Amino acid sequence: AVLLACALPLTAAAAPAPVTPVIALGSVIPAPVQVHQSGPGFRITDRTVIIAPPRARDVADRLGEALRLRVAGHSSGRTGNIALELSRAITEPEGYRLTVNRSGITVRAASNAGLFNGVQTLQQLVPLTGPRTVAGGEIVDHPRFGYRGTMLDLARHFHTPAEVKRHIDEISKFKVNYLHLHLSDDQGWRIQIDSWPRLTTVGGGPGTGVDGVGPGYLTKADYRDLVRYAASRYVTIVPEIDMPGHVNAAQVAYPELTCDGVAPPPRTDTAVGYSSLCIGHENTYGFVEDVIRELAAMTPGPYIHIGGDEAHATTAADYLTFQKRVLPLVAKYGKTAYGWNEIAAAPEARTAVAQYWGLTTTNATLAAAVANGTRVIMSPANLAYIDQKYDPSTPLGLSWAGYIEVRKAYDWDPHTHVAGVPESAVLGVEAPLWSETLRDLDDIEFMAFPRLAGIAELGWSPSRDWESYRTRLGAYGPRWTARGVDFYRSPQIDWS
Ligand code: TNX
């Protein structure tokens, strides 16, 4: 990537004209595929207009809000504007081409998702202060992986729709295009299910969440609104209901989901692995099907995440019995099953997506499943778990998977990370953010940023380069500050 800070040509005046630095065309996170900086740049002024066809109006409006510029359907004069163009000449899905010269800026893409990505790049190239001059040249860009994700845990502490929306705004700036919502766990149930109403009235009620301080749930209307909001930022929501373990909150609400029919006490501690649905009861599968059916009906995205992790209170044989029934249920409602990598033990995971959260670079069960067709999303806990502390002094987060400084979260290769999981089986990367220790949006942002920016680059860019990345990250800091994002000022980065 081109990283030289470049200067505008000095004008003719005799007095030493102030040199206005512009941002090098490649100084963007994630790093673009190709950058050719050349020729004069374009200065955005208050008279600059964003021109976009009606079909791309939504993307144009978003850019207009960000840059405080007017949006129009077509221009009277053809130059001096920022044009968004839908073009079939761009073939990469989600790809775009950004051209900047004296007469204006053009973003071309085959789809609105591609235009949106180009617009995210452009926004990083517009100086925060001073003349808004964008360097001249061209960027040709497209993602390495189709899935670039992160996860919020609404179960351990509920995060409000307003907080989730604000987080969507922030993650989409790095072209993160999937948001996985962990909606149920031992400490709480956070999504309305009409056929089992007590899941939320009890499971999302007062006293739920870690330490009993994280109540709340999404109504179906809230959830649909979030899905729409995310879609307008080209982010797809992936809902997760964790089972057959991590179900204590559901069993408190519905004791018939236990084998003995006795309600367990509510739990607000952070232990894992003690609860299980009753594998031998037919009632269990009625419950699971109701939940999957209702979830699928309100989820336009392709995936339903069924959890499957840490089922230590379920025997290995019961676990397989459960997955044999449940994995196909997801397909019955038109969705692709997605689960934590333990699901790879079940033959029915052949058509599913496994989320690898292990600490090792070998996993025979996963490799065998991949050989049978299972595809993988990489979330190794020691590298991509952004709920882990940066170092021993980090006030938030856990550390069971180790400390994860900014460089550690960046310096690994999702496409070769696990033996027997070739790049062709990898759909992408995801950085999960568990909320045992997190209460509000400031906490979320402090743990997510800057690490999520690095994970996003692993998912998007064709190669990684720590020195280049740390320079671009240091330069990005003032943008977070300007938006009030409380990011971690890692000592590994020279922040501007
Ligand atoms: C393990 S990772 C869990 C979660 C915890 C997390 C905390 C995984 C699939 N399960 O239940 O919240 O560690 O880091």
Image (tube, helix red, strand yellow):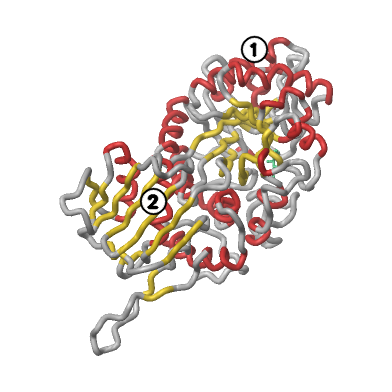
Which residue is drawn at the image coordinates 56% and 57% (left, top)? 450
What amino acid type is highlighted by mark number 1? Gly
Q: Measuring from the top left, give residue 427's x and y in whole percent.
A: 62, 39
Q: Which residue is mark 1?
A: 286
- Asked which secondary structure carries label 2, the reply is helix
What amino acid type is highlighted by mark number 2? Val
- Kindly indicate the quadrant of the structure image that contains residue 288: top right
Which residue is drawn at the image coordinates 74% and 36% (left, top)? 272
- Asked which secondary structure carries label 1, the reply is helix
Which residue is drawn at the image coordinates 49% and 58% (left, top)? 34
Q: Earlier in the sequence, mark 2 or mark 1?
A: 2
Q: Nearer the viewer, residue 178 or 373?
A: 373
Residue 149, visible in the rendered structure: no
Q: Measuring from the top left, give residue 251's x and y in whole percent.
A: 68, 22
Where is ligand 1, by quadrant?
top right
Q: Nearer the viewer, residue 356 or 416?
A: 416
Q: Is residue 291 above or below residue 272?
A: above
Q: Are marks 2 and 1 in contact (CB under 8 Å)?
A: no
Q: Is residue 459 above or below residue 153?
A: below
Farthest residue in the left direction? Answer: 76
Please give the label number shown on residue 119: 2
